[in-house]
Amino acid sequence: MLARDATVLHCHSSHADLAAITRQADFLFVAVGKPGLIGREHIKSGAVVIDVGIGKDANGKTVGDVDYSAISASASAATPVPGGIGPMTILGLLENTLESARKK
């Protein structure tokens, strides 16, 4: 993203006013490992939300860092967990494994 002249901000999950920072994002990438950390108050209308995080809720259900049901009406696009970027992550790992094996 930096190579494309995008302004990139990096925030920690315990930032004093995380929502004030994340609401500025046109594209919000979340990879924290804290289920439901990002809710409606964290995104601006029309933002694209990419949830990379994965965890378990109190019932043991696999969920992401983003409360998908809370943000889905406001976001222009959002990746759910499970079923979002996981398959692409696996594909990337397999490609890297094959490349490493070929080099060996």
Image (tube, helix red, strand yellow):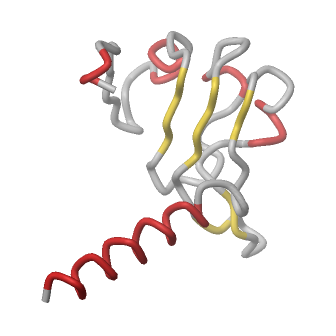
Q: Quadrant of the N terminus?
A: top left
Residue plotted at (73% across, 50% down): 80
Q: How many marks?
A: 0
Up-down relation of residue 68 to residue 74 (above or below):
below
Left or right of 1? Residue 23 is right
Left or right of 89? Residue 15 is left
Up-down relation of residue 10 to residue 17 (above or below):
below
Q: Pick whichever, 27 or 104, lies toward us.
A: 104
**Residue 96 on image: x %, y %:** 31, 72
Residue plotted at (25% across, 23% down): 3
**Residue 11 on image: x %, y %:** 34, 30
**Residue 83 on image: x %, y %:** 72, 61
Residue plotted at (53% across, 24% down): 27
Residue sitting at the far left: 104
Up-down relation of residue 30 to residue 57 (above or below):
above
Q: Pick whichever, 37 or 29, lies toward us.
A: 29
Q: Pick whichever, 9 or 96, lies toward us.
A: 96
Residue sitting at the far front: 102
**Residue 50 on image: x %, y %:** 58, 40
Residue plotted at (61% across, 23% down): 42
Q: Quadrant of the C terminus?
A: bottom left
